[in-house]
Image (spheres, helix red, strand yellow):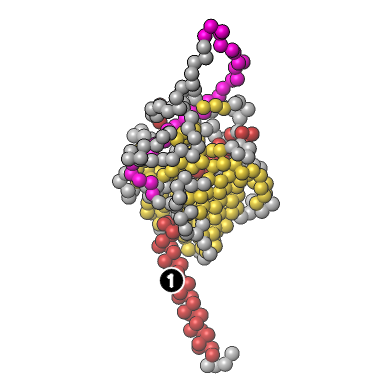
Amino acid sequence: MTANARPRWVLLCAIALVVSSLHLAALSLLGPGWFDPQGPAMPAAPLRVRSVLLVATTPAPAQAPPAAMPVPPAQPAHGPAPKSGAASTAVPTPATPLAREAAAVPAAPDTPIAGPDHAPTEWVDVPVYPTRMPPAGRWRYRLQRGLLVGNAELDWAPQPDARYALQLQGWIAGVSMLDWLSQGQLDAAGIAPERFALRRRGRDAHAANFQREAGKITFSGPTHELPLLPGAQDRLSWLLQLPAIVAAAPERFVAGASVVLFVSGARGDADVWTFVVQGAERVDDRPAQNLVREPRRLYGLRAEIWLDPAEHHLPVRVVQSPTGGGAALALQRDGP
């Protein structure tokens, strides 16, 4: 390299370093929002959803009705929604058959959600499932958002007093880009969040508050409220609630089976997420069970997850993609 070329090369390196630093600084400021792929927030109107309890049942022998008594007609498929707070939770063993509560009215899995100006034709059922929670642990992941690649840690800390803390942190080039925190308690329905926050520099930037006594979800920014159903999850806690549901009765979740969750974000957004089991696959030589959630609306969030049956059905890969455009957020297990 000539003497004249050396200063030019040093100048170009310095410019590249400054530009990279500015990009990382900008991403650091945007991290909590930019690393939260989501569809449009739900309207402030109440969601037409209801809780349905799954209870243990013992098959009874079929009995034909007496000849003198006609078979009564089927009950209509619609009716008033039961209050979410009225349901209690039964936790059957995995070998026990599960069924909907006799008083609950089933609804189609693709029932739309609407506000009072667009009354739905059917209610959306959100079951309360038995769960088997994983033990405490910290798992490392490869983090990718668009072209940016880094690393992340998922830290699960259940406590002896039935409290828990779940945190997902991610870094790119040593700069914190992702910091989600879910805190609450563990109850008969599994994870019961009380607060979910997207954090920036250790402080909450956006948060959802699950007010269980009041039966509602409120937010730090938006002023509208949403109903709080038993088994409701936040945008982080579902990563462990879904595995806990599958782990409690793995024989039920074959290809075509589904899990329905009510999931709330931190910006006033919430929706019913229906995961459909796709079947067995392999991820980095690990046997994994693939489940996919397709959004109900044209612009929503698609979620795909692969669970490891050999390790409490914990996620080995997660991909969340906004269907209205934007880069996907992907996590893939790194190491044991």
Q: Which residue is mark 1?
A: 22
Which residue is more in the foreground, 80 or 121? 121
Look at the picture and state if 215 lies above or below 24. Answer: above
Amino acid carrying mark 1 in the image: Leu
Q: Is residue 104 left or right of residue 206?
A: right
- Residue 75: x and y in percent read 46, 22
Measuring 47% from the left and 45% from the top, which residue is drawn there? 296
Look at the picture and state if 11 lies above or below 192. Answer: below
- Residue 26: x and y in percent read 42, 66
Which residue is more in the foreground, 118 or 104? 118
Tag 1 secondary structure = helix
Measuring 42% from the left and 47% from the top, which residue is drawn there? 265
Task: Report if residue 50 lies within the magenta region.
Answer: yes
Measuring 48% from the left and 54% from the top, which residue is drawn there? 323
In which quadrant is the N terminus drawn?
bottom right
- Residue 292: x and y in percent read 56, 46
Instruction: Write down the region rendered in magenta.
Output: 41-69
Q: How many marks?
A: 1
